[in-house]
Image: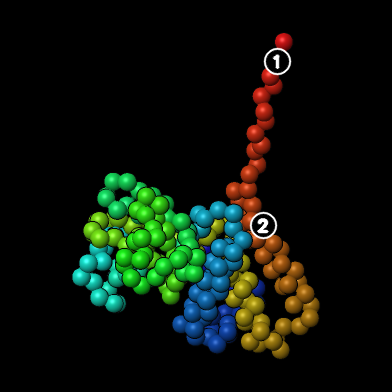
Amino acid sequence: MTVAQLLSRSYRLTNTNSTTFLDGNATNVLADLNTLYGQRILDILRIQTDRNASQTEVKTDLVSVTGLSAGDNGYNGEYAFPTDLLKPVRVEVSYDGTTWNPCKTYDVNEKDGSEHYQTDINNNFDTSEPYVRFDRDSFFIRPVPTATVSNGIHIWYEQRQSDLTTGSPTFETNLHDILAYDLAELEALMHSSKYDYKWWKYFKEKKGECEARFFEFYQSRFSPSLRMIAPIVDYK
C-alpha cells in the first residue's frame, strides 16, 4: 500500500477525511505515519526469525592507525556506524585484501591489557582471529591495522528505514494495513469523544486480528519445517 492508500484506509476506519483526520495537517500526519512505521520495523527486528525485512551490508576501508589523530575514522581501530545502522549483525575483516575472517564480539572488560595503547592491543589480538566490540555508536576492530586495506571491512546490519513520502513500507505488502490501524488509533485517541464504546470494541477486535497476523508472520516466516530423517540401514 502506498502512503495515499494507507491514509485512505485510515480515513475509512475512522469515518473522516483529510481535513478532519488528526489535526488536518498533511505534514504532521505523514510524520505520525513515519513514527509508527519505525516502531513496526523495531517490532519486526524484535520478533523475526529471518533478517530479510531490513538487513543490508556495506564495505569500508580498513585504515592504518599510523598518523591518525583522535576523532579520525580508524583511530585506535574505531569506525563510526553507518548512519542508517539500527543493529550490527556480523563483521568480517581482511588485513591483506585476500583472506577474510569473521570477527568475534567482545566486551571492553573481557580482555586483559590496555584498550588505548596500540602495542598492548595488538599483543592481545591476532589478525587470524579478529575481534570487534560495539560502543558509542562505533565498532572497534582488533587488532588495529598497521596498513590500509581498501574495502577491508565488511559489515552486515539491520538498516533503519527511510521515511515514507509517497511510496510503500518495506515490509511484507500483505501486512501494510497494520499502519492504517495504527494511524486510525491515533485519530481516535485525539478525538476520543467522537468514538463510542461500540466503535472501540470492534476496532480493537479488528486491529488485534491484524497485529496477530503481523506478529505470527514474522515469528514463523522461516521457521524450520523439515526434519532430517536418518536413513534406514539394513544390517543383513
Q: Horizontal and vertical percent for residue 215?
A: 65, 61
Q: How is the image coloured?
A: rainbow
Secondary structure category for the residue under label 1 = loop
In the figure, 114 relative to 212: above or below?
below
Let me know if residue 26 appears in the view: no
Identity of the residue drawn at 53% across and 86% down = 24
In the figure, 171 relative to 184: above or below?
above
Q: Horizontal and vertical percent for residue 50?
A: 55, 53
Near-viewer residue (46 or 235) = 235
Question: For the view shown, which residue lies furthest in the top direction?
Answer: 236
Quick one: label 1 or label 2, which is nearer the N terminus? 2
Question: For the view shown, which residue lies furthest in the left direction?
Answer: 67
175 on left or right of 66? right
Let me know if residue 102 appears in the view: yes
The Cα–Cα distance between marks 1 and 2, rounded to whole angstroms, is 43 Å
Q: Quadrant of the C terminus?
A: top right
Identity of the residue drawn at 43% across and 75% down = 136
Secondary structure category for the residue under label 2 = helix
Q: Horizontal and vertical percent for residue 167?
A: 44, 66
Near-viewer residue (176 or 153) = 153
Query: Disc 1 residue type?
Result: Asp
Residue ID for mark 1:
234
Q: How many marks?
A: 2
Residue ID for mark 2:
216
78 on left or right of 161? left
Mark nearest the camera among 1 and 2 is 1
